[in-house]
Image (cartoon, rainbow, N blue to C red):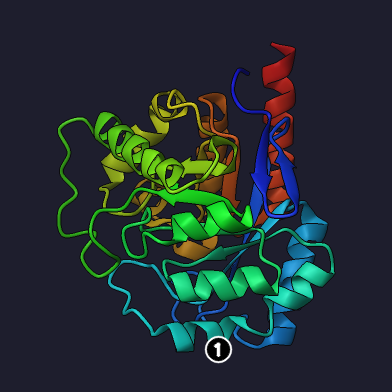
Amino acid sequence: MAGPTEWRVRGGAVSLERPVVLGILNVTPDSFSDGDRYSEPETAIEHGLALVEAGADVIDVGGESTRPGATPVSPEEEWARLSGIIEPLARHGVTVSIDTTKHAVAERAIEAGAAVVNDVSGLRASPSIAELCARTGAGLVIMHMRGDPRTMQNDTRYVDIAGEVGVWLRERAEFARTAGCDATQLVVDPGIGFGKSAEGNFELLARTEEIAALGYPVLVGPSRKSFIGSVSRAPAAERLGGTLAACVAALERGARLFRVHDAGPARQALDVAEAIRRAG
């Protein structure tokens, strides 16, 4: 499949020759799916290493919930949740991504060993994160979201969802490059579940190739989200099958990176789907 073959991150590069799995490690008390399960550093580190053992290429660590309606926390509180986790994982050779919208948290995480910043605000909350990534060489994920987690579901109407999201992502990527980031550092994420209706999420996944046409690697994060439940009626903890279906559908349409809770099943499903795609 045409497109970038690697993603440059701090200290090296992540190959895109096969699907890239980002294992989710939420250390928040109020995550929609696994809130408070990994709030203790030892438990969080153990789970992060287990995700890598199961097949995750990157561990995406978050200290602030971004579920719909979530209340923001201060940079100090967010970092207090993260401070004992990132450095130990990095010492184990784990490629760590910090899921934050705050410059101060991103900077401290990079100092502790994080190789990637995953900004769900698309550089709107802290535009200086772009310069930080340019200066440090960290990889940067730019995600589309309307408003913020408190308001993002207030308006989920689009005239042309893939077209509008694509234009927005192109503009934010150009902003990052103007700040000094190289194109090889950037990944774009259409923001499944962030300011979209269930129908909008399905349409975005169906039109992933239009996001891939921007020329940047595409990350999708459908894991356990409510749009899956809109079809399956399953609670969040029972949406693995729907998550894998969404990941494989996006893979077939050009996505290369997949943010999931269940790294082992995702690794297997994506590797098999990739082998079939290549054989065809």
Up the image or down, 57 lies above or below 25; here it is: above
Up the image or down, 84 lies above or below 257; here it is: below
Q: Residue 54: x, y in percent?
A: 79, 56
Residue situated in front as seen by the camera: 216 or 196: 216
Q: At x 36% / y 39%, what residue is drawn?
A: 169
Q: Secondary structure at mark 1?
A: helix
Q: Residue 192: x, y in percent?
A: 39, 47
Q: At x 61% / y 72%, what residue is drawn?
A: 109
Q: Residue 62: x, y in percent?
A: 53, 71
Q: Quadrant of the N terminus?
A: top right
How many marks the image carries: the answer is 1
Up the image or down, 128 lies above or below 34; here it is: above
Residue 36 visible at all? no
Residue situated in front as seen by the camera: 229 or 211: 211
Residue situated in front as seen by the camera: 46 or 245: 46
| Category of crowding for the residue at label 1, using alpha-carbon neighbours closer than 10 angstroms: few (below 14), some (14–19), many (at least 20) | few
Question: Which residue does the numbered mark 1 point to in the structure image?
Answer: 80
Kindly identify the amino acid type of the residue bearing the numbered disc 1. Ala
Task: Answer with the quarter of the image where residue 171 lies.
Answer: top left
User: With 21 as the anchor, is 161 left or right in this view?
Assistant: left
